[in-house]
């Protein structure tokens, strides 16, 4: 959240100013109203806006009578305060409207103080709208005017805001430089508010760098300063960040405590969107601990606030969260209702891709309930939309699902028809990629051949021309001795140029050939990676089929059918990504969760699990190599947790720093040494998953500056007994 480091709020001062309104003339009343608007904007934004509107009305009346610049400036001040109050409550369109009107007035007057403050305020508004280039533009304008104005307090605030933009762009070093400038200025003038903002923002950078304890310390420093100023808006931000840190450090109880404190303050100041975000954070913690009732209650409260604020984009995500929660509990009717609500919002937002994707989710829900005809209808509709917008991946997944459903119905002819459609699109996607590469190389090859032919013909023409010149010179040589020497010199020079030019052409061609050899080598490496992926997928499928065979052997038909349903969904995820080297992180997480649920079912719930994801990670825009984490999760279950009688715990944590996704897979199993002893006694077959994964890592790291690192650590008790295993994986960040 971008900040407004302007004035502290003092309730006694506000009460005193309200009393001072009595008996004042109009101009004096305008001044008092403007001060009230500024002092109360964080304590009560609605009341602040009322003061601003009253001041604007009086100032306009006075300006209409006298056309004095004093009253024009007061109109600008009032509109600026109104813009700030709207911005604090997240009403950015209204905030930008009033801020632009204030800027028009200030440009007429030309006062650097007014221009500094309005440029900063408009930058804040654009920041809340996510338009970073516009945000940085207005902050830089504010910095320029602020230096001319010479107010260190305001300049400190502007440095903070510029640092936040660079932080959002991922340029952490530049962000830290601006935050340090801000902190230095705030200390010089002993500004508690400025120091509070600087400590807070530097704490965020340490969070991104994975230095959680240092980040927590800085957030507490910012909270202490903000509580001294009674700045409720900023207090809620510090509380929220402290809660996030506790959650990352594994203290869920503390995290819930501070999220609740932040929520209470946001409710007091009417920050609707902020309240919804706090409720979602609380719900996510409960959901991660399988406290589904508490998670549901908080999701529903967030939805009520988003509905009141008409936040369609936020609602579409919250509905999806809630639908997924119901789906995890096999509450199909409720899940269907919220999937349908999300679908309606996608239609209202004209999000055709999202609509097609949601239709497939609804189809899967119907299939789980054996409502196969409804599932078929949904999938056909999804295919129509996907083909209309050219979303081949979505169409491919829908065709595959249709084939599976018709196979369940025993209509193998239709199943084969749709499987062929699925296979056709999959081949098309792969062949399109390969054809493009081959076409590019053929074009370069043909171009090279033409250039060589032209060069050869040019050389031949030049050679023939040279011979003609030589013959003519020889005829004249009998008559003119002097001309002979001149002609000989000219021929020698021309030959030198021709040779030099030929050598240059040959050098360039050799360089191009070397480049082509490099490209061919890269293609060979890519093919080798795909071959290893092709080995990984059968290995994964084979292990899952063993689980199904186990249920059939013990004649547990219900578990076998339930397992088959989950297994088919998991297989579809694997097949969908069979041609992709990397996938969005959200797809890898979904696959992991499906796989862990399958193993938990097979092992009769000997263990529970938690997948903890840093909320700062954009799982839709961040990619990692497909099936990279799964083999380590599989090892934890198969070689560690499986040998326990019960009480097993598996934790998968994902966090992000500037350059890496950091994944930790931790279990309380029997440990590697004990697992080897057990499996040797039972003469179990060796695992092929880890050797294949190791080979994949070698290829992924080849010729790359940022490597993927894996380390395995045996966890030991105070008595030096094994109590589990921890795997740390550092994966270079990639963007979709």
Image: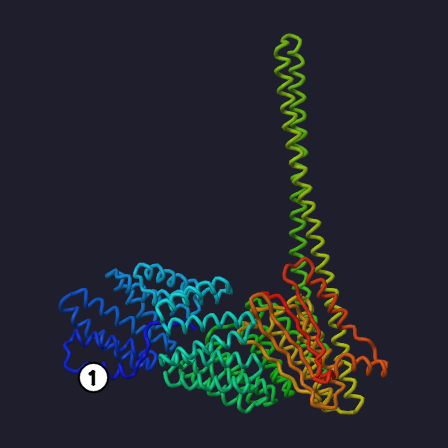
Quadrant for the C terminus in the image: bottom right
Query: For residue 731, which quarter of the picture?
Result: bottom right
Residue drawn at (15%, 79%), measured in percent from left and top?
24
Helix, strand or loop at label 1? It is helix
Left or right, 235 with reference to 645: left
Q: In this view, does 177 lie above or below 598?
A: above
Classed neighbour count for the residue bearing mark 1: other residues with Cα under 10 Å, few (<14), some (14–19), many (≥20): few
Nearest the viewer among 258 and 331 is 258
Nearest the viewer among 84 and 548 is 84
Residue drawn at (26%, 63%), measured in percent from left and top?
106
Q: In this view, does 78 lie above or below 707?
A: below
Query: For residue 488, which quarter of the picture?
Result: top right
Q: Position of residue 636 (x, y in %)?
A: 72, 80
Q: In this view, does 371 lie above or below 502?
A: below
Spot the residue most to the top: 479
Query: For residue 554, which quarter of the picture?
Result: bottom right
Quadrant for the N terminus in the image: bottom left
Q: Where is residue 298 in the image (x, y as percent from the top left)?
A: 49, 87
The residue that mark 1 highlights is 19
Coloring scheme used: rainbow
Q: Position of residue 27 (x, y in %)?
A: 16, 73
Left or right, 381 with reference to 18: right
Whether residue 47 is visible here, answered yes or no, is yes
Q: Where is residue 345 in the image (x, y as percent from the top left)?
A: 48, 78
Count every numbered label the image shows and give the total: 1
Whether residue 128 is visible here, answered yes or no, is no
Left or right, 413 with reference to 242: right
Nearest the viewer among 563 and 697 is 697
Nearest the viewer among 434 and 293 is 293
């Amino acid at each position: 959240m971008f900040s407004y480091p302007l004035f502290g709020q003092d309730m006694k001062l506000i009460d005193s100013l309200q009393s001072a309104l009595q008996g004042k003339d109009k101009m004096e009343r305008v001044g008092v109203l403007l001060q009230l608007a500024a002092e109360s904007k964080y304590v009560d934004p609605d009341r602040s806006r009322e003061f601003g509107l009253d001041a604007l009305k009086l100032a306009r009346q006075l300006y209409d009578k006298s056309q004095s610049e004093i009253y024009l400036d007061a109109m600008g001040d009032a509109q600026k305060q109104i813009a700030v109050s709207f911005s604090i409550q997240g009403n950015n369109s209204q905030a930008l409207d009033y801020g632009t009107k204030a800027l028009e007035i200030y440009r007429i007057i030309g006062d650097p103080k007014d221009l500094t403050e309005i440029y900063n305020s408009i930058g804040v508004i654009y920041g809340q709208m996510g338009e970073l280039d516009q945000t940085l533009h207005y902050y830089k304008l504010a910095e320029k005017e602020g230096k001319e104005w010479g107010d260190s307090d305001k300049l400190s605030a502007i440095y903070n805001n510029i640092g936040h933009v660079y932080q959002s762009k991922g340029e952490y070093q530049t962000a830290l430089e601006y935050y340090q400038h801000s902190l230095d200025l705030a200390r010089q003038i002993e500004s508690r508010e400025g120091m509070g903002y600087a400590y807070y923002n530097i704490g965020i950078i340490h969070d991104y760098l994975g230095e959680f304890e240092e980040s927590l310390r800085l957030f507490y420093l910012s909270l202490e300063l903000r509580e001294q100023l009674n700045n409720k808006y900023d207090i809620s931000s510090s509380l929220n960040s402290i809660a996030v840190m506790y959650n990352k450090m594994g203290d869920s109880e503390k995290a819930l405590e501070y999220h609740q404190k932040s929520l209470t303050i946001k409710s007091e100041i009417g920050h609707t969107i902020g309240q919804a975000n706090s409720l979602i954070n609380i719900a996510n913690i409960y959901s991660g601990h399988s406290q589904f009732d508490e998670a549901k209650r908080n999701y529903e409260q967030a939805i009520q606030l988003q509905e009141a604020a008409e936040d369609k984009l936020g609602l579409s995500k919250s509905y999806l969260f809630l639908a997924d929660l119901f789906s995890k509990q096999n509450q199909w009717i409720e899940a269907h209702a919220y999937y349908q609500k999300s679908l309606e919002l996608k239609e209202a937002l004209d999000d055709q891709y999202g609509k097609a994707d949601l239709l497939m989710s609804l189809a899967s829900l119907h299939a789980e309930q054996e409502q196969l005809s409804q599932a078929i209808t949904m999938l056909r509709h999804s295919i129509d939309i996907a083909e209309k917008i050219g979303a081949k991946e979505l169409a491919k997944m829908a065709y595959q699902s249709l084939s599976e459903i018709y196979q369940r119905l025993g209509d193998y002819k239709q199943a084969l028809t749709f499987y062929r459609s699925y296979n056709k699109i999959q081949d098309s996607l792969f062949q399109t990629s390969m054809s493009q590469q081959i076409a590019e190389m053929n074009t370069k090859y043909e171009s090279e051949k033409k250039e060589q032919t032209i060069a050869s013909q040019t050389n031949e023409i030049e050679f023939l021309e040279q011979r003609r010149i030589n013959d003519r010179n020889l005829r004249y040589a009998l008559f003119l001795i002097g001309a002979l020497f001149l002609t000989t010199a000219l021929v020698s020079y021309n030959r030198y140029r021709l040779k030099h030019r030929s050598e240059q052409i040959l050098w360039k061609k050799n360089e191009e050939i070397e480049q082509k050899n490099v490209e061919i080598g890269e293609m060979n490496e890519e093919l080798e990676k795909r071959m290893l992926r092709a080995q990984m997928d059968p290995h994964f499928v084979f292990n899952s089929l063993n689980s199904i065979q186990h249920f059939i052997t013990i004649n547990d038909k219900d578990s076998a059918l339930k397992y088959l349903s989950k297994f088919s969904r998991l297989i579809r995820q694997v097949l969908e990504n069979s041609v992709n080297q990397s996938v969005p992180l959200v797809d890898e997480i979904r696959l992991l969760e499906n796989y862990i649920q399958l193993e938990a079912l097979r092992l009769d719930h000997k263990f529970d699990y938690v997948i903890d994801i840093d909320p700062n990670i954009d799982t839709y825009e961040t990619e990692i190599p497909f099936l990279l984490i799964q083999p380590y999760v599989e090892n934890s279950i198969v070689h560690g947790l499986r040998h326990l009688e019960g009480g097993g715990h598996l934790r998968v944590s994902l966090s992000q720093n500037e350059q890496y996704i950091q994944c930790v897979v931790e279990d309380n199993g029997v440990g590697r040494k004990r697992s080897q002893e057990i499996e040797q006694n039972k003469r179990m077959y060796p695992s092929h998953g880890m050797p294949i994964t190791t080979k994949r890592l070698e290829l992924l790291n080849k010729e790359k500056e940022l490597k993927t690192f894996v380390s395995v650590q045996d966890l030991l008790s105070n008595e030096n007994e094994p109590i589990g295993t921890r795997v740390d994986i550092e994966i270079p960040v990639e963007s979709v």
